[in-house]
């Protein structure tokens, strides 16, 4: 990509974040002997939860599958993919159906921190109820959207830490739901393997030219 990113005739200098994203690749081969500590996993999820969500719903949940026994249970319902057992951790990325009634609780820390006046909270809850109440498709869309934002942030963070990652949709959703006792309002959106790589992975595959996917209005 070079040393600069161009937009509007002006150049943005690249940095460690952009370089890690521009060189990130889907990892097929992991170092099966490597592991991540609980603190490292928590750090990845903390970064994941910095991603945006509609009305600050934070309607996501993350299950870190990292023990040999847990990986062995997950692999058969994830199409037998070797990365499940080879990666240091596989996250089950869960989206929760958008529920506007949770907004006061989600915004309480925001009010306590002095970021938002308390009287604004109902002004957020009312339009959210209009958007999501009795709208199952919108509730589900928001669950998938929020979970995907969170996963994307973890992917970027993993790359910046020198770790490989791969989002995976090859799994039996009903079996995952049963295995982890997911609630009726929870959707297993994807699996995300993360860990140190071993040799043999391809570099990032070329993308379509920006001119083919970008238009200005």
Image: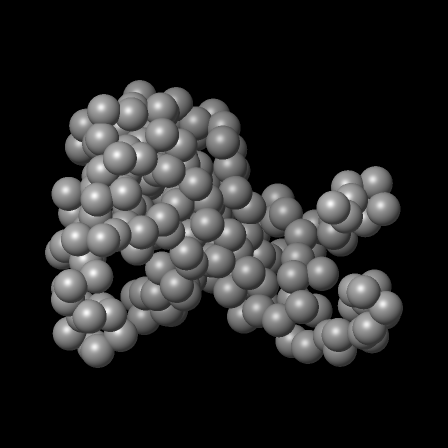
The scheme the figure's colours follow is: one colour
Number of disc labels: 0
Residue 70 in the image: above or below residue 123: above
Q: Where is the N terminus found, in terms of image quarters? A: bottom right
Depth check, front residue: 180 or 138: 138
Residue 184 in the image: above or below residue 114: above
Residue at 37% in and 69% down:
43
- Residue 72, quarter of the rendered image: top left
Residue 52, given in percent of the width and then of the height, sits at 41, 56
Residue at 16% in and 47% down:
102
Residue at 57% in and 57% down:
164
Residue 114 in the image: above or below residue 180: below
Depth check, front residue: 183 or 74: 183
Residue 25, given in percent of the width and then of the height, sits at 67, 52
Residue 113 in the image: above or below residue 38: below
Q: Is residue 182 left or right of residue 188?
A: left
Residue 16, given in percent of the width and then of the height, sits at 65, 76
Depth check, front residue: 94 or 100: 100
Residue 152, given in percent of the width and then of the height, sits at 51, 52
Q: Is residue 92 visible?
A: no
Q: Is residue 58 left or right of residue 141?
A: left
């Amino acid at each position: 990509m070079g040393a600069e990113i161009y937009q509007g005739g002006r150049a943005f200098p690249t940095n460690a974040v952009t370089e890690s994203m521009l060189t990130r690749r889907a990892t097929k081969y992991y170092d099966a002997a490597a592991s991540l500590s609980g603190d490292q996993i928590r750090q990845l999820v903390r970064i994941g939860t910095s991603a945006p969500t509609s009305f600050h719903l934070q309607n996501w949940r993350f299950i870190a599958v990292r023990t040999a026994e847990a990986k062995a249970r997950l692999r058969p319902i994830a199409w037998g993919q070797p990365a499940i057992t080879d990666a240091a951790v596989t996250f089950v990325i869960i989206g929760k159906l958008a529920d506007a009634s949770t907004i006061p609780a989600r915004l309480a820390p925001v009010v306590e921190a002095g970021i938002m006046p308390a009287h604004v909270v109902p002004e957020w809850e009312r339009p959210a109820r209009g958007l999501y109440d009795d709208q199952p498709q919108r509730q589900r869309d928001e669950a998938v959207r929020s979970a995907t934002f969170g996963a994307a942030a973890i992917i970027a963070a993993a790359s910046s830490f020198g770790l490989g990652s791969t989002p995976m949709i090859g799994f039996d959703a009903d079996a995952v739901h049963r295995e982890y006792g997911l609630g009726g309002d929870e959707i297993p959106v994807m699996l995300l393997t993360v860990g140190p790589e071993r040799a043999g992975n391809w570099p990032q595959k070329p993308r379509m030219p920006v001119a083919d996917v970008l238009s200005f209005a």
